[in-house]
Image (cartoon, helix red, strand yellow):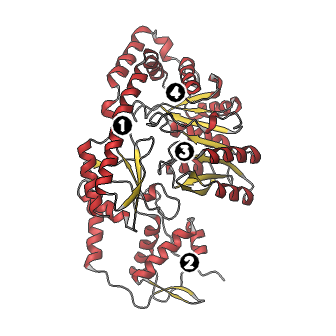
């Protein structure tokens, strides 16, 4: 018989606090306010996970915390109960909560972001000049009317040429849709692919804004582990034999987010084979292809001639600046036509004037020159970041210098409380990403530290402080 449970726990997926800690704190608050009393039984972990709509491991971790702190006790073959003797709220606990309150008000001076480019070196003067010139040389009726929902045709042709030449693809302008950033591309793809009850496999750890987009379209997530060779294909195969309604898989194979691992060739080929056999779509997010510091970047999965079911998503925001909202979606003409119809519902067209301005920079060679400059700058910063990490973190962490991208993935050698470390760093004006922002269920132990937007002095200052708490 199921145990009655009247307590409502609100989960905030956007909170900086891990979900298991939110659950634990909500139960503690219920005990302190008398909603739960000594001797009251809690539901089993499976039932509680179902009620809260979270992973069972998340509930188990919350219960483990409460048992360790003395709020709950377990009785063999009977279950979990509120303890008869409850812990006293100590000064240390009050101090911790005071620290949490203070950190919310602090504006950090140094931010290790998730790999954002340095906007200070963006070609803003050149872009502003091109934008003004578009206004001056075009008649108002030409630039102020509606244009194609897929984007400016000449701009599409330019992106197609770039993808075919640099990324080994073989596409035409009717196979691409220009969007307001890659997030819009994911939204459009999701609402064309999914209906309620469909499944999508996702990397864990992975890119949470994409997960939220898929769930918004009605899809349910199936997390797949990531190792040094990228997505673990064995887990993909297990899901495919277990679930019949898997519509897609979302991957970041070039520089996996957040671990920076590159999906191996063997696994790429197997993933394509599985996609062709089972008919699911590979949604490939190539968010920072341009920044590769080795001999040559690995070609996208979507460039393979035997890949039948792919949606390729890219962005120009990393090339120029995050504020420039231009992305693109590439797929077969039928899928792109569905995307275009859905796009007209939410956004009749893109920013035609900005597309023409960026096209002018492409035609003038300015984008190519900018990429060459920034690649040299970011490679030097990456190498410097590695030097600093070797100096202060080598004995305490594991990390591999990434071949590309604008961030490092750093894993502590021994267990640490990353949330406490984040709070202590924030008190010193340094902000880091906490792992619940890219973890499914239980937060994964690791730091994603973006370096591109920081100076060398900031990089060293931040790593020195981080090393103190590891």
What SS does tag 4 mark? loop
Q: Do the residues labelled 3 and 1 touch (CB within 8 Å)?
A: no
Q: Which mark is residue 378?
A: 1
363 lies left or right of 418: right
Q: Which mark is residue 350?
A: 4
Distance of label 3 from label 1 (alpha carbons): 20 Å
Distance of label 2 from label 1 (alpha carbons): 54 Å
What SS does tag 2 mark? loop
Of residues 468 and 31, the one nearer the viewer is 468
Count neighbours of disc 3 (C-alpha within 10 A) and say few if under 14, some if 14 to 19, many if 20 or more. many
Mark earlier in primary sequence (2, 1): 2
Mark earlier in primary sequence (3, 1): 3
Distance of label 4 from label 2 (alpha carbons): 49 Å
103 lies left or right of 35: left
Mark earlier in primary sequence (4, 2): 2
Q: Do the residues labelled 4 and 3 touch (CB within 8 Å)?
A: no
Q: Are marks 1 and 4 in contact (CB under 8 Å)?
A: no
Mark earlier in primary sequence (1, 4): 4
Q: Quadrant of the N terminus?
A: bottom right
Count neighbours of disc 4 (C-alpha within 10 A) and say few if under 14, some if 14 to 19, many if 20 or more. many
Instruction: Nearest to the eye among marks 2 and 1: give it.
Output: 1
Q: Name the residue under label 3.
A: 252
> Could you tell me if residue 107 is visible in this image?
no
Instruction: Nearest to the eye among marks 3 and 1: give it.
Output: 1
Residue 146 coordinates in the image, percent (x, y): 54, 20
Count neighbours of disc 2 (C-alpha within 10 A) and say few if under 14, some if 14 to 19, many if 20 or more. some
Res. 116 image quadrant: top left
Mark earlier in primary sequence (3, 2): 2
Distance of label 4 from label 3 (alpha carbons): 25 Å
Q: Which mark is residue 5?
A: 2
């Amino acid at each position: 018989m199921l145990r009655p449970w009247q307590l409502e726990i609100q989960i905030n997926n956007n909170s900086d606090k891990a979900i298991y800690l939110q659950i634990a704190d909500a139960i503690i608050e219920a005990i302190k306010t008398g909603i739960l009393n000594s001797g009251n039984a809690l539901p089993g972990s499976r039932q509680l996970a179902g009620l809260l709509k979270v992973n069972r491991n998340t509930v188990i971790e919350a219960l483990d915390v409460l048992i360790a702190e003395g709020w709950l006790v377990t009785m063999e073959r009977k279950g979990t109960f509120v303890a008869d003797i409850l812990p006293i709220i100590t000064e240390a606990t009050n101090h911790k909560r005071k620290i949490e309150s203070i950190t919310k008000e602090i504006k950090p001076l140094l931010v290790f972001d998730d790999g954002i480019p340095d906007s200070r070196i963006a070609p803003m003067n050149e872009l502003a000049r091109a934008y003004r010139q578009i206004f001056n040389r075009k008649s108002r009726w030409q630039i102020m009317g509606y244009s194609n929902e897929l984007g400016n045709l000449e701009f599409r042709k330019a992106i197609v040429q770039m993808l075919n030449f640099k990324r080994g693809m073989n596409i035409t302008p009717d196979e691409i849709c220009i969007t307001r950033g890659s997030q819009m591309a994911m939204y459009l793809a999701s609402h064309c692919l999914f209906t309620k009850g469909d499944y999508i496999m996702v990397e864990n750890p992975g890119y949470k804004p994409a997960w939220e987009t898929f769930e918004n379209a009605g899809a349910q997530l199936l997390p797949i582990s990531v190792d040094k060779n990228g997505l673990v294909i064995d887990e993909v195969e297990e899901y495919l034999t277990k679930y019949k309604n898997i519509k897609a898989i979302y991957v970041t194979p070039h520089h996996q987010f957040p671990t920076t691992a590159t999906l191996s060739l063997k696994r790429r080929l197997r993933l394509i084979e599985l996609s062709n056999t089972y008919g699911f779509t590979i949604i490939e997010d190539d968010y920072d292809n341009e920044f590769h510091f080795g001999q040559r970047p690995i070609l996208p999965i979507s460039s393979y001639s035997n890949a039948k079911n792919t949606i390729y998503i890219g962005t120009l925001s990393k090339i120029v600046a995050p504020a420039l909202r231009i992305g693109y979606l590439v797929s077969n003409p039928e899928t792109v036509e569905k995307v275009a119809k859905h796009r007209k519902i939410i956004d009749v067209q893109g920013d035609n004037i900005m597309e023409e301005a960026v096209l002018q920079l492409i035609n003038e060679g300015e984008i190519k020159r900018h990429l060459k400059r920034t690649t040299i700058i970011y490679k030097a910063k990456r190498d410097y970041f590695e030097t600093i990490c070797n100096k202060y973190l080598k004995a305490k962490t594991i990390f591999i210098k990434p071949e590309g991208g604008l961030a490092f993935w750093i894993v502590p050698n021994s267990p640490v409380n990353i949330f406490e470390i984040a709070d202590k760093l924030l008190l010193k004006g340094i902000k880091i990403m906490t792992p619940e922002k890219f973890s499914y269920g239980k937060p994964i132990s690791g730091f994603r530290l973006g370096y591109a937007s920081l100076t060398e002095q900031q990089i060293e200052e931040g790593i020195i402080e981080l090393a103190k708490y590891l």
